[in-house]
Image (spheres, rainbow, N blue to C red):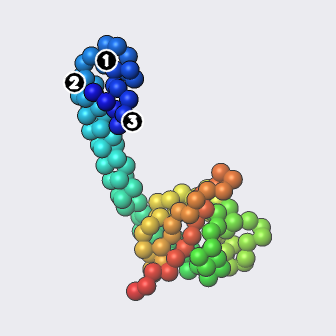
Amino acid sequence: MTAPSGRRVMSVLPGSVAHDAGVLEALLRELLAEMKGLRADLAARRSAPAALNREDRACVAGLVPVIGAIYGSEKFAARDLVDADAPPALRLVTRGLTAQQLGSLFSRGAGQVIDGFVLERAGNELHATLWQVFRVPA
């Protein structure tokens, strides 16, 4: 039996395993099935809608138009919205919220269309999640 590389399997595998190709094949099939199951679980988890209650949805609905007006589609971190340097409009709509609370709120609402806007994860920078707001055509 030869491997895809053209090398003989007997020379690549340890002695006892090489003699029982059936066992090896069964193990590989089992691993493949497990990987397919894990991928399906991950896909289902990614596509599951985040949980936003009415209060959270109203909060995000008040935030995203202001964030979109200031940042456009540029990336931002939740801490940028509550910094002392933040524009007054942002400080007004984020009043009483911490960067951590905003990040949690954004995580729950990521990918959901809210009043014509969608908030998306855009990567990480210095251990902070970056976000983007996009206008969704009606």
Say if 7 sits above or below 121 in the image. Answer: above
User: What quarter of the picture does the C terminus occupy?
Assistant: bottom left
- Secondary element at image label 2: helix
- Mark 3 and mark 2 residues within 8 Å of each other at the beta carbon: no
Quadrant housing residue 38 = top left
Looking at this view, name the residue that lies furthest to the right: 85
Say if 10 sits above or below 49 in the image. Answer: above
Q: Is residue 59 left or right of residue 9?
A: right
Quadrant housing residue 65 = bottom right
Q: Which residue is mark 3?
A: 5
Q: Residues within 10 Å of mark 1 (few under 14, many from 20)?
A: few
Q: Is residue 41 left or right of residue 82?
A: left
Q: Is residue 29 left or right of residue 107?
A: left
Q: Residues within 10 Å of mark 3 (few under 14, many from 20)?
A: few
Quadrant housing residue 15 = top left
Instruction: Estimate the x, y position of residue 2 in percent, counting from the top left.
Output: 31, 30
Q: Residues within 10 Å of mark 2 (few under 14, many from 20)?
A: few
- Secondary element at image label 1: helix
Task: Give the residue displayed 66% in from the left and 56% down from the top.
Answer: 125
Q: Which mark identifies residue 126?
A: none
Task: Give the residue displayed 35% in from the left and 37% down from the top.
Answer: 4
Which amino acid type is marked by label 1? Val
Q: Label 3 vs label 2: CA separation? A: 20 Å
Instruction: Estimate the x, y position of residue 92 in percent, counting from the top left.
Output: 67, 75
Say if 57 sits above or below 51 in the image. Answer: below
Q: Which residue is mark 1?
A: 17
In the rendered structure, which disc, 2 or 1, sits on the residue that comes first in sequence? 1
Task: Give the residue displayed 44% in from the left and 67% down from the top.
Answer: 111
Which amino acid type is marked by label 3? Ser
In the rendered structure, which disc, 3 or 2, sits on the residue that comes first in sequence? 3
Q: Which residue is mark 2?
A: 22
Q: Is residue 63 left or right of residue 84?
A: left
